[in-house]
């Protein structure tokens, strides 16, 4: 709902702040008073074309701000998400547009700079304009299908079509994925078989490279250690015979000393005996050390053949890894992957056949749901045509004929909303061909046709309705026809917000709120003013519309009668 319109320096309006309430609001005034300026300002704020002519003479900048209060689930919020604009759904939505005297314009949403295109998209969601010079909404055939679906209350079959479409596209994607995989696998099957056979022969194991590297390091260390032990063992070569020779030599020296008269307990013999004992002990310890060295050598499990085999295995693994452009640790994973791809290639034909069958089933389900929806749309289209036709007579369009066409498109042009192109068509004269609304109907006819269509749709649409603006929908009609226009506008306003620019007292009398647009000034300056009328002021304005310049008591009585009707 539009709750406020702020205008600064637009054409003849210097400054204007308009609070706007629900229901039907009528804008009246003499021709040329500036009623269209109000709509121009609203259009400016919602993305209409900006021109330098909109800037009030003498001003540097024109500005229009529209304040909306959409429901929390209104699609306008989703559009802000899509455009990356911040908002709070509990607060109002502010659309602002400025135009400088040189024609340059800027657009803002909640004080965030944006493009005019975003304002235009938001405006299309928030309001519809039907008038002499422009119609926004009905002329766009893209709006016709949602309107027909709302009228026919086709939410359930539409949801079924959407789900079937989703399933069909999913099945198609799965089929295409399998077909691409099968093609790729077939192309590389020979290569896969060769690489897999190489990996099967090699049988790489997880963590094998680290184990082999450790073994190689240990074996290499053992070889060097044994060399060092051998050097130590060489030091003992010939040591025992030499020490035994030293013992015999000392024994002979002791015997000579005794034969020469030395006492057995004397110092000479004693010392020779001590030397012999020391050598005996050293010989024993040397033999023990030699045995310990031999034991240490035995502790090293060194097999030259094993080292060679370890190095060959490591070289082979690393060579295969380089060949396949992976790490050694990835070889077992790659082996499993190659096996899976080869199995997939071998079974891809069966999988592809199953996917083709699922795709055909999903397509058939979608087409059946879409055909059912199409049939319901055609039935709803006939009902809508009848409902609109019943509204055309009272609106002085009794010679016009309205129809809804539901054209079934090719399956490749279908979508989640079905396979139909829906269009509203009209023939304004007997025998004249049907055609699109904007090509056949005049401005006044189109405005009244829009009113008839909206009246037929009233109460059927789901969710919040946009602001509807009717610009001189009553042009060229009066009396009972004007009264019929007023009644239908009032009916629309019971479920939606409606603004109407009117010269008809019958229409103005049906309004919930009434604005009088006037122009005043002197030879140098002219200004447009907007007055929100009280109940008594409304009576006077409607009397003026009935009587003209001279307002009589009879006109006032007639005005009261219209307002009370």
Image (cartoon, rainbow, N blue to C red):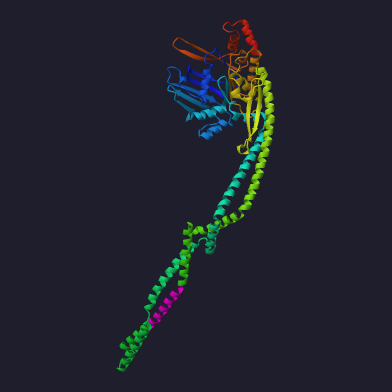
The vertical placement of 138 against 169, above or below, is: above
The number of callouts visible is 0
Residue shown at the point (58%, 28%) measured from the top left: 140
Most frequent secondary structure within the magenta stretch = helix
Image: magenta residue range: 280-300
Question: Where's residue 187, x and y in %?
Answer: 55, 54
Question: Where's residue 185, x and y in %?
Answer: 56, 53
Is 498 or 173 nearer to us in this picture? 173
Q: Is residue 521 left or right of residue 26?
A: left
Q: Is residue 362 left or right of residue 216?
A: right
Report whether residue 234 is seen: yes
Is 318 or 112 nearer to us in this picture? 318
From the image, which quarter does the C terminus lie in?
top right
The vertical placement of 122 against 415, above or below, is: above
Picture quadrant of residue 376: top right
The vertical placement of 228 against 276, above or below, is: above
Report whether residue 110 is seen: no
Is 14 or 437 nearer to us in this picture? 437
Residue shown at the point (51%, 29%) measured from the top left: 117
Q: Is residue 225 magenta?
A: no
Question: Where's residue 43, x and y in %?
Answer: 52, 23
From the image, which quarter does the N terminus lie in?
top right
Residue furthest left in the image: 260
Is 312 or 24 nearer to us in this picture? 312
Picture quadrant of residue 428: top right
The vertical placement of 191 against 388, above or below, is: below
Picture quadrant of residue 159: top right
Question: Where's residue 416, x and y in %?
Answer: 62, 37
């Amino acid at each position: 709902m539009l709750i406020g319109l702020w205008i600064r320096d637009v054409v003849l309006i210097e400054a204007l702040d308009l609070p706007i309430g629900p229901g039907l609001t009528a804008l009246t005034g003499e021709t040329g008073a500036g009623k269209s300026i109000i709509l121009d300002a609203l259009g400016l704020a919602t993305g209409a074309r900006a021109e330098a002519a909109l800037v009030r003479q003498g001003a540097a900048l024109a500005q229009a701000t529209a304040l909306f209060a959409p429901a929390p689930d209104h699609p306008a919020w989703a559009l802000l998400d899509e455009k990356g604009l911040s908002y709070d759904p509990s607060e109002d939505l502010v659309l602002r547009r400025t135009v400088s005297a040189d024609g340059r314009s800027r657009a803002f949403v909640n004080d965030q700079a944006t493009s005019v295109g975003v304002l235009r998209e938001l405006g299309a969601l928030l309001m519809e304009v039907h008038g002499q010079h422009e119609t926004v909404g009905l002329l766009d055939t893209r709006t016709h299908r949602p309107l027909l679906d709302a009228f026919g209350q086709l939410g359930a079959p539409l949801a079924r079509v959407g789900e079937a479409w989703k399933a069909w596209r999913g099945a198609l994607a799965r089929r295409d994925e399998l077909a691409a995989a099968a093609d790729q696998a077939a192309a590389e099957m020979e290569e896969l078989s060769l690489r897999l056979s190489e990996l099967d022969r090699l049988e790489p194991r997880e963590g094998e490279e680290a184990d082999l590297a450790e073994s190689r390091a240990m074996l290499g260390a053992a070889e060097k250690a044994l060399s060092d032990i051998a050097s130590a063992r060489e030091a003992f070569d010939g040591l025992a015979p030499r020490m035994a020779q030293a013992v015999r030599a000392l024994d002979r020296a002791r015997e000579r000393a005794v034969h020469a008269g030395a006492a057995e307990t004397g110092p000479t013999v004693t010392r020779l005996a001590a030397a012999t004992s020391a050598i005996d002990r050293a010989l024993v310890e040397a033999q023990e050390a030699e045995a310990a060295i031999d034991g240490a050598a035995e502790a090293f499990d060194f097999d030259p053949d094993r080292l060679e085999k370890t190095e060959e295995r490591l070289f082979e693994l690393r060579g295969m890894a380089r060949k396949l452009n992976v790490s050694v640790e990835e070889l077992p994973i790659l082996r499993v992957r190659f096996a899976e791809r080869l199995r997939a290639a071998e079974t891809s034909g069966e999988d592809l056949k199953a996917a083709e069958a699922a795709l055909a089933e999903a397509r058939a389900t979608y087409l059946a749901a879409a055909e059912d929806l199409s049939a319901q749309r055609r039935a709803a289209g006939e009902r809508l045509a009848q409902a609109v036709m019943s509204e055309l007579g009272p609106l002085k369009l009794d010679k016009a004929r309205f129809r809804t066409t539901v054209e079934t498109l090719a399956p490749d042009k279908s979508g989640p909303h079905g396979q139909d192109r829906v269009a509203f068509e009209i023939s304004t004269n007997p025998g004249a061909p049907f055609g699109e609304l904007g090509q056949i109907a005049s401005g006044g006819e189109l405005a009244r046709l829009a009113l008839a269509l909206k009246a037929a749709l009233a109460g059927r649409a789901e969710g919040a309705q946009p602001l509807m603006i009717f610009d001189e929908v009553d042009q060229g009609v009066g009396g009972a026809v004007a009264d019929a226009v007023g009644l239908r506008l009032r009916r629309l306003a019971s479920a939606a917000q409606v603004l109407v620019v009117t010269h008809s007292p019958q229409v103005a009398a049906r309004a919930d709120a009434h604005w009088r647009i006037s122009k005043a000034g002197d030879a140098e300056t002219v200004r447009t003013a907007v007055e929100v009328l009280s109940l008594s002021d409304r009576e006077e304005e409607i009397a003026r519309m009935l009587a003209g310049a001279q307002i009589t008591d009879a006109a006032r009585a007639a005005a009261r009668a219209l307002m009370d009707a």
